[in-house]
């Protein structure tokens, strides 16, 4: 089996005039279909840089990147855009929804730029389906400003899902969420992963990383540890526990 | 992306900033409105001039005394009378291509009838005058050649005379006193209304020119001679023949001519040249405001691109091509300007309608002006939207996403 994502000795150097920042210093990594990996590391260790590279938003300074066996260094700007549209779903660190645009229209966005023309009926149905997956179908016509942080994050996830990507990349998807909403989001991720979508997510929290199958830790642009998760948390069980605890708290109060 | 979705996206974006979109379009609305209104005024003036010239009759030549060909101390046109009845007779006799002629004298006089009085213009003409001018009678008949030869005391009157002197009775057969000379009314002219200059064309009495000279004005010279050529192709020949005949009779040369022959086309050309210049000038001024409107669009689109850098980044990140971003912004600019153009056309039509109602200016909204203004406004959007759109399309997705 060939890996969905295969990077070899990838470096990224930001060259902003006087100072050169060597953000990623030689990372080699294989990701197979159905993997769910947490990317961890201190602030500034190069996680977002690596994610942007994996997301084909940015090109590595050196090294090779094969996505689904396609060498992205051979692709031009537009072919990269098509690749992002068809194979990748990206959830940004700060949700990055279009303001004054309804949740539904935000989720429809990637379908507007697909190679295949999607009728507006189908577009709506698919967008609604994805909002349903993240549990927001009742908020379809709300604007981002009318949604909570967690809801906005889930709209961003729905948008990343709408073109049925092979790889879902999420940069700190739970960074702004309370622990209960975080578990909800992890529930969505685990469900998607069970359906076969490969997931890479950045997190600072160990307990969130524990919902994944594999943990990768970076320091100063290098991988310092790459371990399978031994005792994986299951979001569904965790949710149940939280509900029970809440019910108990109510009883006491 | 497909053009349909591009337009949808553009409309969504414009709707999100409805107030700003309307204000931006306002520049184009004013520009296009001004173009339409100005060109309508110009065209209206032109059509009135054309109508007035057509009212002179078909294939008409006008001979008047005095020369306008050179300066010096010569009198102007219609100056010292130099045309005589004999000149008119000679033209009638010798110029075979002239099918009708009518010598003309003019004077103004107090007229009396029915116990009422009125001051009006008296026109002395030949029996063919109404045929040359293509001016029908609404009642009665035109006086005859015999009346002209016999210095007859007959007249035909305009509609204004009817309202002023014969408010209750039919004027036909009634007696009208011009400078105390009785004239029998034999015909009433059809109404003509106001001229472009605003004078009442129905305020006149026409008598045989012989009667006008001997009984009313007591003059021996003609003011002018109206000549009608057989057809349009004969106009020039007729004109040349008349000139050489009159030169022979008056013993003049081109330098010393004491008469002028103008044909209708020359009069029309001169008038058209003036109104064309006016239309062009008004159109140009209005065009400038359209360009100013275009700059307004460019300005707002540039602001919009900067302001929406993040949005552009998001679109690029989810798979938009640079061309699609460019198309989106270009479509927005064109939708804005075409929307402005459409409203502007309505405003322009309304404004010219209003002007013609309030100021009695003749206006004529031309379909060409409407089409040109619309296409031009769309083109303005295209031209001034291009640079901002191009700028947007060249953004790098990561840089755009990181833009604060
Ligand atoms: N566009 C850029 N230009 C220059 N340097 C950059 C740029 N983006 C990131 N860097 C630098 O690269 C390094 C890695 O940044 P990166 O954003 O990948 O860190 P991170 O691991 O995502 O941190 P955090 O956990 O705070 O999000 C940092 O030192 C940062 O300053
Ligand atoms: Mg980061």
Image (cartoon, coloured by chain):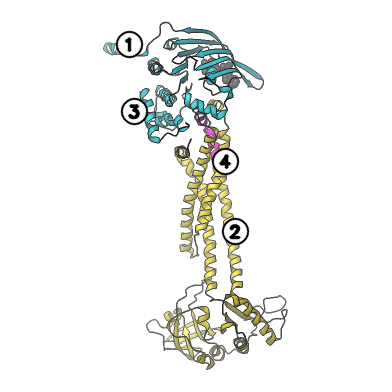
The crowding category of the residue bearing disc 1, from other C-alpha atoms within 10 Å (few below 14, some 14 to 19, many at least 20), is few
Q: Which residue is mark 2?
A: B281
How far apart marks 3 and 1 lie (CA) works out to 26 Å
* Eye-nearest disc, 2 or 3: 3
Answer yes or no: do the residues labelled 3 and 4 have beta carbons within 8 Å?
Answer: no
What secondary structure do most residues of the magenta stretch adopt? helix
The crowding category of the residue bearing disc 4, from other C-alpha atoms within 10 Å (few below 14, some 14 to 19, many at least 20), is many
Q: Which residue is mark 1?
A: A241
* Eye-nearest disc, 1 or 4: 4
* Eye-nearest disc, 2 or 4: 4
Chain letter, colour yellow in render: B
Image: magenta residue range: B298-320
The tag earlier along the polypeptide, 3 or 1, is 3
The crowding category of the residue bearing disc 2, from other C-alpha atoms within 10 Å (few below 14, some 14 to 19, many at least 20), is some
Question: Which numbered dot is residue B386?
Answer: 4
Please identify the quadrant where the C terminus of chain B is shown. top right
Residues at marks 1 and 4 on the same chain: no
Residues at marks 3 and 4 on the same chain: no
x and y percentages locating residue B147 in the rendered image: 50, 91
* Vertical arrangement, residue B15 with respect to residue B230, above or below: above
- Residue A75: image quadrant is top right
Q: Is residue B296 visible?
A: no
Q: Which residue is mark 3?
A: A138
Using the image as rendered, state which of residue B275 and residue B3 is in the foreground: B3
The crowding category of the residue bearing disc 3, from other C-alpha atoms within 10 Å (few below 14, some 14 to 19, many at least 20), is few
How far apart marks 2 and 3 lie (CA) works out to 61 Å
The tag earlier along the polypeptide, 2 or 4, is 2
x and y percentages locating residue B13 in the rendered image: 47, 37
Answer yes or no: do the residues labelled 2 and 3 have beta carbons within 8 Å?
Answer: no
């Amino acid at each position: 089996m060939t890996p969905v994502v295969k990077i070899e000795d990838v470096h990224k150097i930001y060259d902003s005039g006087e100072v050169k920042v060597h953000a990623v210093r030689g990372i080699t990594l294989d990701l197979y279909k159905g993997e769910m990996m947490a990317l961890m590391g201190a602030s500034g260790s190069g996680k977002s840089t690596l994610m942007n590279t994996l997301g084909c938003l940015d090109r590595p300074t050196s090294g090779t990147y094969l996505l689904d066996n396609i060498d992205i260094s051979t692709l031009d700007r537009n072919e990269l855009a098509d690749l992002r549209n068809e194979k990748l779903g990206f959830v940004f660190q700060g949700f990055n929804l279009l303001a004054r645009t309804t949740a539904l229209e935000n989720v429809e966005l990637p379908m507007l730029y697909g190679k295949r023309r999607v009728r507006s009926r189908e577009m709506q149905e698919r967008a609604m389906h994805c909002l349903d997956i993240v549990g927001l179908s009742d908020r379809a016509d709300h604007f981002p400003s009318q949604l909570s942080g967690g809801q906005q994050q889930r709209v961003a996830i729905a948008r990343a899902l709408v073109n049925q990507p092979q790889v879902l990349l999420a940069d700190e998807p739970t960074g702004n969420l309370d622990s209960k909403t975080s578990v909800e989001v992890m529930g969505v991720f685990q469900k998607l992963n069970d359906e076969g979508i490969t997931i890479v997510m950045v997190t600072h929290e160990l307990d969130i990383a524990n919902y994944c199958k594999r943990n990768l830790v970076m320091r100063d642009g290098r991988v310092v540890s790459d371990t399978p998760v031994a005792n994986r948390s299951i979001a569904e069980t965790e949710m149940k526990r939280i509900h029970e605890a809440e019910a108990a708290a109510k009883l006491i109060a | 992306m497909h053009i349909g979705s591009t337009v949808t996206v553009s409309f969504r974006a414009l709707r999100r900033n409805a107030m700003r979109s309307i204000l931006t379009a306002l520049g184009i609305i004013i520009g296009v409105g001004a173009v339409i209104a100005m060109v309508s005024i110009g065209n209206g003036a032109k059509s009135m001039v054309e109508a007035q010239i057509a009212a002179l009759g078909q294939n008409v030549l006008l001979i008047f005394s005095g020369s306008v060909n050179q300066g010096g101390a010569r009198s102007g046109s219609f100056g010292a009378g130099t045309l005589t009845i004999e000149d008119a007779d000679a033209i009638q006799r010798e110029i075979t291509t002239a099918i009708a002629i009518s010598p003309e004298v003019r004077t103004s006089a107090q007229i009396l009838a029915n116990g009422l009085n009125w001051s009006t213009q008296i026109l002395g003409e030949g029996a063919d005058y109404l045929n040359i001018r293509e001016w029908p009678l609404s009642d009665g008949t035109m006086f005859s050649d015999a009346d002209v030869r016999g210095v007859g005391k007959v007249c035909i009157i305009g509609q204004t005379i009817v309202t002023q002197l014969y408010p209750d009775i039919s004027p036909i057969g009634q007696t009208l006193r011009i400078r105390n000379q009785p004239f029998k009314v034999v015909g009433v002219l059809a109404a003509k209304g106001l001229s472009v200059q605003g004078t009442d064309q129905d305020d006149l009495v026409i008598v045989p020119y012989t009667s006008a000279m001997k009984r009313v004005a007591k003059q021996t010279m003609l003011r002018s001679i109206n000549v009608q050529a057989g057809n349009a192709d004969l106009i020039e020949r007729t004109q040349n023949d008349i000139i050489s005949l009159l030169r022979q009779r008056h013993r003049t040369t081109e330098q010393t001519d004491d008469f002028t022959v103008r044909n209708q086309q020359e009069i029309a050309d001169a008038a058209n040249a003036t109104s064309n210049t006016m239309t062009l000038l008004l159109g140009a001024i209005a065009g400038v405001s359209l360009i100013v409107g275009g700059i307004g669009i460019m300005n707002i689109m540039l602001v919009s691109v900067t302001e929406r850098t993040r949005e552009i980044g998001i679109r690029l990140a989810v798979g938009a091509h640079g061309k699609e971003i460019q198309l989106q912004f270009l479509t927005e600019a064109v939708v804005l300007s075409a929307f402005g153009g459409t409203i502007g056309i309505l405003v322009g039509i309304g404004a010219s309608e209003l002007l013609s109602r309030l100021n009695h200016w003749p206006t004529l909204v031309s379909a060409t002006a409407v089409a040109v203004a619309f296409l031009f406004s769309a083109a303005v959007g295209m031209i001034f939207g291009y640079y901002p759109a191009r700028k947007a399309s060249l953004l790098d997705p990561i840089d755009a996403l990181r833009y604060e």
